[in-house]
């Protein structure tokens, strides 16, 4: 299988390398080059990831006439800045030739912009799901770790990229090789298709928050536009408001009302920084009665006005220059794309 990984500026390095390494391990374990890969970019040369590490890539123009078996678009911050007609043309040409097209993290935005996901299921990192749904209503957005819809496959990024790659190995070769690869990489539980990005019943450091608090937070998250009152949330959960207040103060260190507001503002920030939706519509979609109230709450939480954040928020966090985000010069480390 020949794989092209197309990286965009500020791509997520961990997700991209996590996707590549299982193929290296599978080749090593089987003593045979089942998988070949190459990392490319639009301009070629060194491309910096979101953490400041740079990798060496080949120019897309030099490989665009090839027909890989799989082409994966890996992007993170501001995918819309790197999604132009020339790239769309290459992706569509590959699609016509039967190439399986995939994406890591926000790469699905680029496939969506190229109209290559219409009528398909796809996923992106949960931070970007709301804006993805707004921008591409013809795509069935999913909160799953990865989605394999025929010859369109997408992954939310992070460590899920490893599960994603191992599932590709499983489909291309065998369960035995997929198992050996996962074991070799100390990945002791392969998450299946359908696994959600955030399972509220599970905490990485163990269960520390009572199920009643989790349930209340889930009710809040499911009612962001048509908001509920705290007494209504209590009735959904089956608990008194006094008891819920005590639990939230102990385990969340916030009142239920403040936490509910923050959930809505977090959703709003994604829409502010990742879409061109009018701020007045975002205010309503996030459960605020007026834009004035929304802007005041937004500034209080994020220390920046939504209009300003629409500009600042499109710049990768590490490289922002506002008083709250002083830029740091990241040391460039060159890593050559290699294969076994």
Image (cartoon, grey):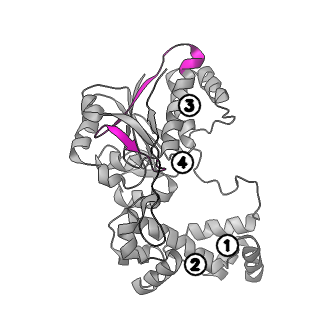
Q: Residue at left 42%, top 38%?
A: 55
In space, the residues marked 4 and 3 are separated at their CA atoms by: 16 Å
Q: Residues within 10 Å of mark 3 (few under 14, many from 20)?
A: many
Please say whether residue 261 is visible from this viewpoint: yes
1 or 4: mark nearer the eye: 4
First in sequence: mark 1 vs mark 2: 2
4 or 2: mark nearer the eye: 4
Q: Which residue is mark 2?
A: 228
Q: Quadrant of the N terminus?
A: top left
First in sequence: mark 2 vs mark 3: 3
Q: Position of residue 158 (x, y in %)?
A: 54, 46
Q: Which residue is mark 3?
A: 166
Report if residue 290 lies within the magenta region: no
Q: Which residues are magenta?
A: 27-52
For mark 4, give the secondary structure. Answer: loop
Q: Residue at left 42%, top 58%?
A: 316
Q: Which residue is mark 1?
A: 236
Q: Position of residue 173 (x, y in %)?
A: 53, 20
Q: Which residue is mark 4?
A: 144
For mark 1, give the secondary structure. Answer: helix
Q: Residues within 10 Å of mark 4 (few under 14, many from 20)?
A: many
């Amino acid at each position: 299988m020949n794989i092209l990984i197309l990286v965009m500026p500020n791509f997520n390095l961990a997700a991209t390398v996590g996707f590549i390494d299982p193929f290296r391990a599978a080749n090593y374990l089987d003593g045979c080059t089942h998988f070949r890969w190459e990392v490319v970019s639009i301009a070629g040369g060194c491309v910096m990831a979101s953490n400041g590490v740079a990798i060496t890539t080949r120019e897309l123009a030099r490989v665009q006439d090839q027909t890989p078996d799989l082409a994966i678009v890996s992007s993170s911050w501001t995918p819309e800045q790197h999604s132009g007609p020339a790239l769309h043309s290459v992706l569509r040409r590959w699609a016509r030739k039967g190439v399986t097209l995939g994406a890591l993290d926000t790469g699905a935005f680029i496939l969506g912009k190229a109209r290559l996901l219409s009528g398909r299921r796809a996923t992106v990192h949960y931070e970007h799901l709301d804006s993805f749904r707004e921008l591409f209503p013809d795509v069935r957005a999913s909160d799953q770790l990865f989605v394999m819809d025929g010859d369109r496959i997408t992954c939310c990024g992070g460590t899920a990229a490893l599960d994603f790659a191992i599932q590709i190995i499983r489909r291309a070769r065998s369960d035995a090789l997929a198992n050996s690869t996962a074991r070799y990489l100390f990945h002791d539980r392969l998450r299946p298709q359908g696994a959600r990005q955030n399972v509220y019943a599970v905490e990485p450091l163990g269960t520390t928050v009572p199920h009643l608090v989790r349930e209340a937070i889930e009710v809040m998250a499911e009612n962001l536009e048509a908001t509920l009152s705290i007494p209504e949330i209590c009735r959904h959960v089956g608990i008194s408001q006094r008891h819920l207040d005590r639990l939230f103060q102990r385990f969340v260190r916030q009142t239920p009302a403040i936490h509910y507001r923050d959930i809505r503002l977090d959703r709003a920030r994604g829409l502010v920084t990742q879409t061109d939706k009018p701020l007045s519509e975002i205010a309503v979609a996030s459960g605020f009665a007026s834009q004035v109230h929304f802007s005041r709450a937004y500034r209080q939480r994020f220390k920046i006005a939504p209009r300003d954040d629409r500009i600042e928020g499109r710049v990768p966090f590490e490289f922002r220059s506002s008083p709250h985000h002083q830029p740091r010069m990241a040391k460039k480390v060159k890593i050559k794309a290699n294969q076994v």
